Image: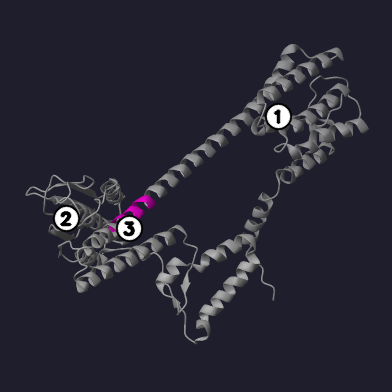
Amino acid sequence: MLRLPPPGRRMAAALSWWRSRSTVVRDGPLGIALALVAFVPPLAASGTRLGELPHRPADALAVAAVLAQTLPLAGRRRWPAACLAVVAAGFTVQELRGYATFAGAGLLVAIFSAGAHQERLRRTAATAAGAAYVALAVALHAAGSANRVQDYVLFFAFLAVGWLGGAWLRGARAAEAERGRITAAAARTQERARIARELHDVITHHVTAMVVQADAAQYLTAKPDRLAGNLTAISTTGRSALGELRDLLGVLDPDRVAHRSPDRSPEQDALQDPDRGTERIARRDPERSTERVARRDADRGGGRGTGTDPEPVAPRGQLPSLATLGELVARIRAAGQPVELVEDGDPGGLGGGREMAAYRVVQEALTNALKYAAGHPTVVRLEHRPDGLRIRVTTAGNSSVRPGQPGERGQPGQPNGPGEAVGGSGRGLAGLRERVEVFGGELSAGAAPGGGFVVDARIPAGEVA
């Protein structure tokens, strides 16, 4: 049994199809309708008579004049100047011959359309139209028209209102398009800033930890057991960074759904993503893309002949939260930074966005401690309150060395180990402040009263009005 879609859906589909047609097709019915109306009594004998010349019965030339004033309206948006010229010619023949038809209304439609849709040489088109009207008025007067000058001026003003109305519509549409472009540009700027903050949070933290661990490993060549631990920590940090970057890239391309076969590791999937090749083929040949995806999914679904179920990749969007702070602190400790995590109160669940902002605050503060006060004790204190979360990260040491300001080699503000200092971009704390303010919170960073450096943030619970 054939099942038809609901009437509303059919109507929406029909409107969508109609809007997809060219402007000539969509404007054609207007010209055809006006041409038919011009031959319907009593409108066939009534219409615009500018010169008030003696009435003449309709003949073949009258039919041609009617068609010239109506059918060209199909191109009023695509070729507005040409449409106006042809319609004006038909109107001139109608007036000089003394015909009276309703088709004269096409002149006003053509003038309005030219004012709204003419792209280039607008002043030239307006001047030419005005000169043509003056010539028509002179010709009508020479043909014996009894109209006075003010009659022609009044009709010209009526036509000018039509042009100005089209020009106003054109300006309104241009202003709306400009507002749309500005809004889109602002949205792109905000999105780029958000992506920059995310990349900074992920890359700076993990790379800093890896650099510090690698520097320390150079001193452990005589202690294989400790060296192995450092190398393991570097590998773990790299995998964590890779996972967070894949989650972030998954947010940027949410339509991609990745799978992993049982005989492939997450690291192999990260370094060689088969979906990329499929996307390139999809742009060239959708059918080949579909067949390739089907074969790939069949291979994975069948476990490549092993009879096992496919192992899906962890869903994208598993972004950091307060529940993963323990892992963050463990990584910093593995890098050689003494960190203590203290939590007061009962976590009430701030929500995904707020928890991620809180995680990034702690992450940035610990990264700065690792970069500029390596080896100095750091305390992370979380105070869960009914009205939100209070975060305070205190690092003991030289308070004169602040994030983004490198200290001297070998001083507390400098990372341990040989090599160059891990510099800062200055983006971290500023980006965190913006991130926290989105949720109505506040963040401050500066020297602690007893020495060292402190990062203090408050993130309120609930929605921001």
Q: Which mark is residue 305?
A: none
Q: Nearer the viewer, mark 2 or mark 1?
A: 2
Question: Mark 2, residues whose alpha carbon is within 10 Å: few (<14), some, or many (≥20)?
Answer: many
Q: CA distance from mark 2 to mark 1?
A: 70 Å
In reply to whether residue 68 is colored magenta, the answer given is: no
Q: Is residue 69 left or right of residue 238?
A: right
N-term mark: 3 or 2 = 3
Q: Nearer the viewer, mark 3 or mark 1?
A: 3
What residue did someone put label 2 on? 392
N-term mark: 2 or 1 = 1
The answer to whether residue 136 shows anywhere in this view is yes
Tag 3, which secondary structure?
Answer: helix
The residue lying at 43 percent from left, 71 percent from top is 268
What residue did someone put label 3 on? 202
Q: In the image, residue 118 lies at what x, y percent? A: 67, 31
* Rendered view: 85 above or below 340: above
* Rendered view: 405 above or below 103: below
Dominant secondary structure of the residues highlighted in magenta in the image: helix
Which sits in the foreground, 246 or 137? Answer: 246
The quadrant where residue 104 appears: top right
The quadrant where residue 222 appears: bottom left
Tag 1, which secondary structure?
Answer: helix
What residue did someone put label 1 on? 111
The quadrant where residue 252 appears: bottom left
Residues in magenta? 195-205
Question: Mark 1, residues whose alpha carbon is within 10 Å: few (<14), some, or many (≥20)?
Answer: many
Question: Mark 3, residues whose alpha carbon is within 10 Å: few (<14), some, or many (≥20)?
Answer: many
